[in-house]
Image (cartoon, helix red, strand yellow):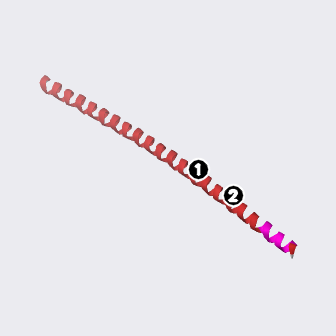
């Protein structure tokens, strides 16, 4: 009887340890996923910022071109 109780106690301890190990693995996996998500968000933010900056630069260039065209049209209108 004593031997069976010891055996059951050992099995319970092993089961508890297995459960704690599994929980720790899950926590590490979740932490890793959080870090990967954070890195992905940071990368997306960086790419969006670069795209916005490029669009801003292109819009500024277009505005300068249009301003030049309008000025030339006004000059030609004033001449005639």
Whole-percent x, y for residue 31 in the image? 41, 38
Whole-percent x, y for residue 26 in the image? 35, 39
Disc 1, disc 2: CB below 8 Å?
no
Q: Place residue 3 in its image quadrant.
A: top left
Predominant secondary structure, magenta span: helix
Highlighted magenta segment, given as a residue range: 70-78
Q: Gap in Å between the C-alphas at discs 1 and 2? A: 16 Å
Residue at image mark 1: 49
Q: Is residue 61 a member of the stretch shown in magenta? A: no
Q: So how many labels did they put on this image? A: 2
Q: Place residue 18 in its image quadrant.
A: top left
Q: Residues within 10 Å of mark 1 (few under 14, many from 20)?
A: few
Q: Residue at x 13, y 27 (%)?
A: 4
Whole-percent x, y for residue 66 in the image? 73, 65
Q: Residue at x 56, y 52 (%)?
A: 48
Secondary element at image label 1? helix
Q: State whether residue 35 is above or below residue 17.
A: below
Residue at image mark 2: 60
């Amino acid at each position: 009887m004593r031997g069976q109780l010891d055996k059951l106690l050992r099995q319970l301890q092993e089961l508890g340890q297995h459960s704690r190990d599994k929980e720790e693995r899950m926590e590490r996996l979740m932490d890793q996923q959080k870090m990967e998500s954070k890195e992905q968000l940071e990368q997306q933010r960086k790419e969006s910022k670069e795209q916005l900056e490029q669009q801003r630069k292109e819009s500024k260039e277009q505005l300068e071109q249009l301003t030049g065209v309008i000025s030339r049209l006004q000059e030609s209108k004033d001449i005639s």
